[in-house]
Image (cartoon, rainbow, N blue to C red):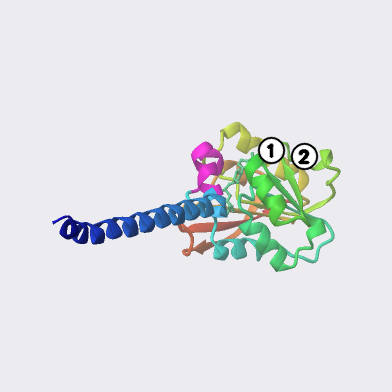
């Protein structure tokens, strides 16, 4: 009788043990996957988005197509600085370097400490300046990283930042860019300028729709008026 019960229970116990092992493996794999997502650029982006939605102002990092579209507006051969504002995970920084902008002429200004840390690890050869684009010239001077500016490439969310911050940022761009030099800005707005202040001191040179971005975006090309 006992022998029969043992014969019946044994497969059941073996089955439970196997299921337990699979469960543990699954839990460990899920934990590893969650850690990998947390450590990835997309995970960092989502964390920053939850923390400062208006400061990030986007639901997902820029696509490579959008980044290349922005970088294509910059002439890599000039002698002055190329300043990137609001670099986030660094997709546009990568595109600017791939475009041929020398690392020692690139200045990247990012307000979030977590993004700035990530950018420093990803681009040790580039000056990553943690600071507010609304104080751009001070941020450049404080790091002894200033100089004539040939181009400004901005991923700042002009439509969700506070109006006084946007006004200060645009004032800095007007003051630092020389006449004829480009200001490149992306926007999710389907038409027009992302901020009315851009019509003061800048001339629109064209725009470029990028459908392969989440959501679709536009690169707006402006030039500092003479
Ligand atoms: C739309 S997200 C950047 C997207 C980026 N191209 C990417 O793919 O990760 C906007 C970025 O601007 C930064 N930012 C917002 N306000 C800023 C400010 N006043 N000065 C500098 N950076 C700012 C945010 O921290 C964020 O990294």
Question: In what element is the residue under mark 2?
Answer: helix
How many neighbours does mark 2 have within 10 angstroms: few (below 14), some (14-19), or many (20 or more)?
A: some
Quarter residue 140 falls in: top right
Question: In what element is the residue under mark 1?
Answer: loop
How many neighbours does mark 1 have within 10 angstroms: few (below 14), some (14-19), or many (20 or more)?
A: some
Q: Which mark is first along the chain, 2 or 1?
A: 1
Q: Is residue 190 visible?
A: no
The answer to whether residue 111 is left or right of residue 150 is left
Residue at the image point whose x is 66% and y is 49% from the top = 118
User: Could you say where residue 63 lies in the image, as x and y percent from the top left?
Assistant: 54, 61
Residue at the image point whose x is 76% and y is 63% from the top = 101
Contact, mark 1 vs mark 2 (Cβ under 8 Å): yes
What residue sits right under mark 1 in the picture? 132
Q: Is residue 34 magenta?
A: no
In the image, is residue 202 above or below residue 8? above
What residue sits right under mark 2 in the picture? 139
Nearer the observer, 226 or 157: 157
Quarter residue 96 falls in: bottom right
Residue at the image point whose x is 74% and y is 67% from the top = 100
């Amino acid at each position: 009788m006992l022998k029969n019960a043992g014969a019946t229970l044994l497969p059941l116990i073996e089955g439970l043990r196997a299921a337990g092992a699979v469960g543990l493996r699954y839990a460990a794999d899920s934990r590893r996957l969650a850690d990998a997502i947390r450590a990835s650029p997309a995970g960092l982006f989502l964390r920053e988005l939850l923390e400062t939605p208006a400061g990030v102002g986007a639901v997902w990092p820029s696509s490579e197509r959008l980044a290349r579209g922005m970088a294509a507006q910059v002439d890599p051969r000039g002698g002055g600085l190329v300043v990137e504002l609001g670099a986030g995970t660094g997709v546009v920084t990568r595109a600017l370097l791939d475009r041929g902008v020398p690392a020692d002429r690139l200045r990247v200004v990012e307000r979030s400490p977590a993004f700035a840390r990530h950018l420093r690890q990803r681009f040790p050869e580039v000056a990553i300046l943690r600071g507010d684009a609304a104080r751009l010239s001070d941020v450049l001077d404080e790091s002894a990283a200033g100089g004539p500016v040939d181009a400004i490439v901005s991923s700042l969310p002009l439509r969700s930042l506070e109006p006084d911050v946007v006004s200060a940022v645009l004032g800095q761009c007007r003051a630092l860019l020389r006449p004829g030099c480009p200001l490149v800005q992306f926007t999710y707005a389907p038409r027009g300028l992302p901020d009315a202040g851009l019509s003061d001191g800048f001339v629109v040179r064209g725009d470029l729709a990028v459908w392969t971005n989440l959501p679709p975006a536009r690169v707006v090309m402006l030039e500092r008026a003479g």
